[in-house]
Amino acid sequence: MKAMKARSFYCTYVKNNLFSKLLATLSAISVLTIVTLAYLLYAFMAESVRSDILANQRRAMEAVSARLQASSDSVQRIVADIYQDQALSQNVTYLLSHPFADYFRYRIDRYADEPRAGYGNAITYFERRLAADSSIRQLMLYSSVEQYLYAWKAGGSPQLRELNSALSFIPDAMALELPAISAPNLWVARELGLDADRLYAVRAAVNNPGTLQKTGQLLVHFSSDSLVSALRPYLDELKGYVLVLTPQGQVLFDSSGRYYGSIYPYASRISTLDSAAALDRPSQVAVLSDSLAGYSVVGVVPDAQLEAASAGLRRTVMLLSGIGILLAVVLPGIAVASVARRTGSLVRLMRRVESGDFAGRIQDERGDELGQIGQGFNRMLDQLNRQIEQEYKAELRQRSTELSAIQARINPHFLSNTLEVIRMRAVSRGADDVAEMIYSLSVLFRSMVGSRSLVPLREELELGRRYLELFRIRYKDRFAYSIRMDDSLAGRPVVKLSLQPVMENYIVHGLDTERDDNRFDISAARGEGARIVVTLRDNGRGMAPEALEALRQRLQRPPQGQDEGGSFGLQSIRDRLRLVYGPNAAGLDIDSAPGAGTTVTLWFPDGSDSGSGEPGGAEER
């Protein structure tokens, strides 16, 4: 049962419903288009967000690298100042080449000769350099000749450490060839009590200007936290973290603060050739290396953070796509439902018309195609109703005529034989004129009760002659008639009894028995446009203009019923001609004037000759 209902629903609303298919097609196309565009838009915008994040990280890395380079340049400027200032250079060279006690006496001896700026005093010079740079945590001058370390600490007192290579690892560590920027030496940090986790060291060799022999090193410890200021413009949009690593993987700087004081555990997985790396989690890695300075700036952005950055964008795109899909389905659905409703009304009306109900109409005044179809259908129904009404009335009149003819054919042989007996009786009595009248009447009677609706033109004119002959005999020399016909039209079929009503009107209304020149003329000839024109003209009383105009207007009206003159009146002639030949192919016209007679003109198409002169279906007598 459920299967049958489902199948019925499918056939009614899906399989056999054009609008459901149209809506489904439009919705599928719209949804597919919106989903495709949303995916492409999200992919483009997500890639744009991803590129912006990586570009921001790249700029942050460049800023850190620039800050490190600035630190290295600062140390190199200190060395350059030493070499450029002769007094300072001699002072520093003496400090690094002699025991500190000898340097102290040397300073006292040369105090008066020092420049006013005080740069002749190395200790004063380095103190001022320390105070001028807040990022410096400690500045150290190491003597390779005497093996001692003199250190200036920010916010603290200078320290002097006498070293012995046999008792300390510092001389050996200082003798190593290290990059310009490196991690603080562990032994130096312990000796000076430094927290080396958040420091990086910048070193520069100090040579004797005269002999160019290396006399010592300048070692400056910078705070790694100072590099945070380089990241400050990028922190709001910075994802992941930024590292500064030594070639051995030692962490000099970590923006996340997790890896200070240790070797970066994933240093071996970082490659300058591949941006994707599997660290603690899948990440995007960028590397800026400075082989001369001896450090690498590494930017790490986990893939999860990149995806999280586009999560809001994804939700926005999905929301907008959902709204777009909803609108793409609902709006066409409303439009299609409206069209389906209007079309359904038209289909239901067509079914009503199919079942014979012509009373319904489409109530749709809109000017679109469906509105025009509905209005055209309404006009067609109105015209069809008028046509049905006209044909129905014409059929009623035809049936009435046929009924009259059938009633007139009641026992025709009996009536015909009776007229023949009367005619023979008149002949036996010598009343030849009466016998002739009876014979004409018998001929008319036999013709009227015949079953044919079309007869040859010559036969219709012969019936007219017989009818007129009756009244010629009756009125003797007071009435005359004439009949003329184009011989080529003798066999043309015409509507039976189409002339008798005109003759009858003349006899009843036009013939003046007080006159002896009454005349009725009939002529049949070819007209223009392959027509046959029959003209019936009399010289009777005629008609007043008002009566003539009223008759013409009545003849112009649609068929309403039988004429006042009976079933063979002028209206009957007009209706029968139009029914047989069509409303525009045949017709009737009348012209009359008081005392000047009346002229009735009939025209109809020139039908083809049958060859024998008789139309098909002629009754044998």
Image: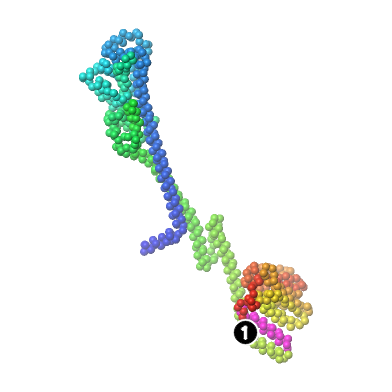
Measuring 57% from the left and 64% from the top, which residue is drawn there?
382
Is residue 506 in sight in this rendering?
A: no
Q: Which element type, helix, strand or loop, lies under badge 1?
A: helix
x, y (%) of residue 453? 62, 76
x, y (%) of residue 354? 51, 66
What count of labels does the image hold?
1
Measuring 31% from the left and 34% from the top, which residue is drawn there?
270
Q: Quadrant of residue 451?
A: bottom right
| Secondary structure mostly seen in the magenta stretch | helix
Q: Residue furthest bottom?
A: 428
x, y (%) of residue 189? 26, 23
Q: Quadrant of residue 211?
A: top left
Q: Residue furthest left?
A: 166
Q: Decide which of 561, 319 is in the foreground and name it.
A: 319
Relative to 368, is 526 on the left or the right?
Answer: right
Relative to 79, is 373 on the left or the right?
Answer: right
Residue 276 among magenta residues: no
Relative to 523, is 388 on the left or the right?
Answer: left
Measuring 35% from the left and 21% from the top, which residue is drawn there?
76
Residue 449 among magenta residues: yes
Relative to 361, is 116 on the left or the right?
Answer: left
Q: Decide which of 483, 310 is in the foreground and name it.
A: 483
Colour scheme employed for the rendering of this structure: rainbow
Q: Decide which of 91, 228 is in the foreground and name it.
A: 91
Is residue 380 in sight in this rendering?
A: yes
Q: Residues within 10 Å of mark 1 (few under 14, many from 20)?
A: some
x, y (%) of residue 107? 31, 10
- The residue stretch that appears in magenta: 431-452
Residue annotated with mark 1: 412
Query: Quick check: 18 above or below 280?
Result: below
